[in-house]
Amino acid sequence: MPTPDSDSAASGQAGHRWLIIGLGLVSALTAVLFTVAPVNAETTTYRWDGAQDTALPLYPYHPARLDATVRCADPDGLLFATTPPKGKQGAEPLAGGLEIRAADGTVRAELGGTELFRRPAGADCQLTVHADGEGTTVGTARTTSRPSVTGLYTEHPGAVSAQIEPDTRWVSAPSAAKIALGVVSLLALLGMIVLLIRRDRVAARRIRLLPRRAWVPRPADLVVTGVLGVWSVIGALTVDDGYISTMLRARETSGFTGNYFRWFNAPEAPWGWYYELYALLGRVTPAMVWMRLPSVLLGLASWFLIDRVVLPRLVNRPTRWTRWATAALFLAWYVAFDVGLRPEPWIVFGSLAVFALVERAVAANAVTPVAIGLVVAGATATTNPLGIAAFLPFIAAVRPLFRLVRRRSDLRVLGAVAVVVGAGASALLTAFYDQPLTAVLESTAVRQKIGPDLPWQSEINRYGTLLDPSVVEGALNRRVPVLLMLLAMVLLAVLLIWRRAPGLAVGPARRMVVISVLCLVVLTFTPTKWTHHFGALAGFGTVLIAMLVHTVARGALSSVWERAAALGLVAATTWLAWSAPNWWWMQSDYDVRWGDTVPTVKGVRLADLALWAGLAVALAGAVAGVWQTAKRRDGAGRAPRWLPRSSWVIVAVAAATVAVEVVGQAQAVKVRWSTYSVGRSNLASLGLAASAGKAGNSCGVEDWLDVEPDIGAGVLKPSSPASAEGFATNTAFPPDAAPPAPFGSDPEHPAWSSHGSPSRTGTLVSGWYDLPADVGSPDSPPVVISRAAHGKVQVSVEFAKADGTVLATMKAKEDTSGKWLDARFDPRWQAPGAQRVRVVARDADPGAGWVAVTAPRIPRLTPLTNVVPVPEPVTLDWTNAFVLPCRTPASLADGIVQLVRYRFAPGQDAQSLVGVSYAADAGGPYVPLYADAKATELPTYLRGDKVREPVAVFRYDYPVPMRGLTVEHGLRPTSGLAKQTAVLDAASGGSG
């Protein structure tokens, strides 16, 4: 018969269950409503009275709304245009502008070169122009296309007036209702978790959360901390550090975190909430070491989880050897991929935390870890599409989790469902914190339509790139951890299926292998196929390899045949992994040991050495096994002691890789101490090295940069005449390849060209030019020539003594693009003692080939900051933005691109990487600037490294400035479900 106390306990248990259910459902419902709650959208309106032309570089290029009134009774000429007319155009005009002209008594309107409207121009002629997301109307004509707007132009001041509202749909602030819904959802979630904790105290098993003395530092902890700390100072860039750092800096003016360099600055939502934390850090200082701090701390936290929580769950009694092995494996992953601004460190930590929580729930019969794990998984999943991997531990443990639900009669099915939906819906708060649902859907559509958006069938490309030694994506540092993980995955799967994995906890180990396989499946559905995405697997990948190392050390693969075969597989994997250079991104590869070649010692490739040594030992072990079996000796089939286990070989490979990476970067700092390197610059920013001088000690690469404001000032004087057979002097250049001013304009600045030569070939040998006496000093600028070419041609310079004895002939790098490029030469190293120089060019292409060159020069330099002051905003390209921490990027605020005066681009070798920022079909932000401005290069030179150009500077000159506009700002309440017009104009081919 139930007692009053038992009745009361049952009633309280039921009450708690219904309260948990209610709180879970409230949390989920308010989170869903949070995504569609209204926001206050910011609007900007530009009013133009038509008194004078003005630049107005809209971004996106089409306006949200344009209204204009055009009086067409005026004389012939341009009445109205939204892109610069001839004579006022920039370097690369943008297509799709609207133009209305009067000629011979007729008014004609064109949009993107297509005629829209034609009518007689009478005394009362007046046209009304209207454009919005549905299309454009001019008079009585209508089209679904919209005009591109980079300015407003007319040849008849006062004949036109216009009002333009740019597309600022993503600039918004949450309404009071949205904030309230978010707060209620969070409070309900916290209340539910508190109640679950109380229920677990009664129903769950008591298990220690952490092992005893878990917080006491261990030697392996100190090594991991030391290596990550050193790497944060001297270590290489990750590919998107510059991309993300610019996004963070631009957020201050744009009002949201957008992609900046492409996709019309569409917001990162529903991914990237963690950028807000980085933006707060950037307000303190944008210094590289400081901005790397979160990834280092996440690395240390991930190591703590692996060593104290995850590994003890997977292996029985981990030894000190296991811990050191795991530390080496973790560093091989984390150093190569994860110290930077990309989201992978968050995914590593989040996925490890979720795995630990799921395993605790299974072991302790507890529900609270499931709820917290879902919250962590949701937050991890909304950092990046790959973050979905954080949910994989739930999938791998679905059977024990179902058993857990059946055992927990205090919650029952409805309670479990409420916990799942209440905790899982928290992901909506991080996904839609800054944007409503319709805005997120449109930003996603923009990224998908512009691309890249590769299908899952293209996943093989990722592995093909990983094994391509000609690209940085296939470098040694990336191959080692990934290939070791794949090897471990296969061997562990076989051992667990055969039930021959001593030292492993079978259930958790199987789940870890399943999770790792599913991670590779998740990778296949990412829209891009870069190898840096493997960095998200640093946690699971480390644990997987460590499991193999541990079980092999405990006796798995113990027979001579198994040990020999495993050793051969490890040797082959090592050979494949080390058959690539130790290559790093951008400026972090300067003078790194083996950065451009496969590692060798005295001409012997280390990869080949590892392969043949491993195979030889494995073969010797196999022979020993055959001999034992044939002789029927005692212990036949057992591996001899001298045959090494593959476990320590794997660890040795990982440790050697980390050593090569860290020592290589440290050596580069030493070799380049007198000039720029990532490590030298970071040491200066920390006050641990002397300032580079002119620009201070915390402005990255520009501390060492000088600029050549006038390329004609340093031209050398000839001491003998030129011999030019088939070459013309200061003429005959291709129409689209005029030499850089002032070359080709007078005898003092000669340029020669073989274009249009009657013989179709030619040879140029310039006169000798005397070099200054200090040309061989470390501080002297290099010898520079400019050249352009197409076809089978060759350009070189000859250095000689004063009497004409040639000391060295140096070829300019081949380039047949037809663009003018500089070639730089350093006589100090290439021709010691040289006193003269001349240019030799040969055109051996009788077809369409041609070559043009200028006279040599010794640049006259000034510090870059004397020409472009540090506070002045500039356009930054993603490849070098992180090494220019003091520079402010051109703002993308108020619906326009800021009209800045200078561009900081990558050097010639990397300029092809940044094309998306200047491509209309990619939604690049700098397209309107090049439509409105001419660009002139100002060559830069790295003090102490004469021939390398990490940053190229261009000056923008605007034929028409931005002027005569009245700007108005406002707020417009917008529902989160309000239909939005597409950013992309389908009728114009999606160009804007």
Image (cartoon, grey):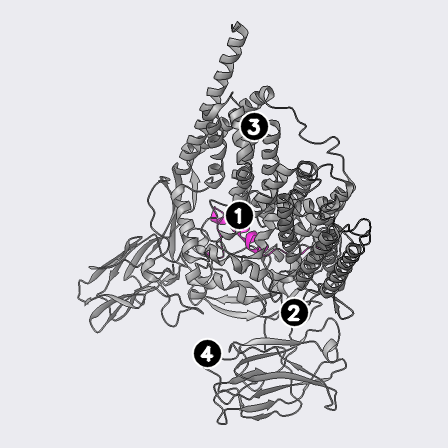
Say which mark, if any, is on residue 368.
3
Tell me the CA gap for discs 3 and 1: 25 Å
Residue 109 location in percent, x, y?
26, 66
Residue 27 location in percent, x, y?
46, 29
In terms of sequence position, does the residue under pointer 3 or pointer 1 come before the other? 3
Residue 262 location in percent, x, y?
47, 57
Q: Determine crowd level at label 1: few under 14, some 14-19, many 20+ residues with C-alpha closer than 10 A.
A: many
In terms of sequence position, does the residue under pointer 2 or pointer 1 come before the other? 1
Closer-to-camera residue (677/608): 608
Q: Quadrant of residue 373?
A: top right
| Residue at the disc numbered 1 | 386
Q: Residue 571, can we see it?
A: yes
Asked whether disc 3 touches disc 1, contact meaning CB atoms under 8 Å apart, the reply is no
Residue drawn at point x = 47 percent, y = 83 percent? 734
Left or right: residue 391 compared with residue 92: right
SS at circle 1: helix
Q: Quadrant of residue 119?
A: bottom left
Q: Quadrant of residue 814?
A: bottom right
Magenta stretch contains residue 316? no
In terms of sequence position, does the residue under pointer 4 or pointer 2 come before the other? 4
Q: Amino acid at mark 4?
A: Asp
- Of badges 1 and 4, the one in the foreground is 1
| Residue at the disc numbered 2 | 948
Give the magenta part as a residue range.
Answer: 234-262
Q: Determine crowd level at label 3: few under 14, some 14-19, many 20+ residues with C-alpha closer than 10 A.
A: many
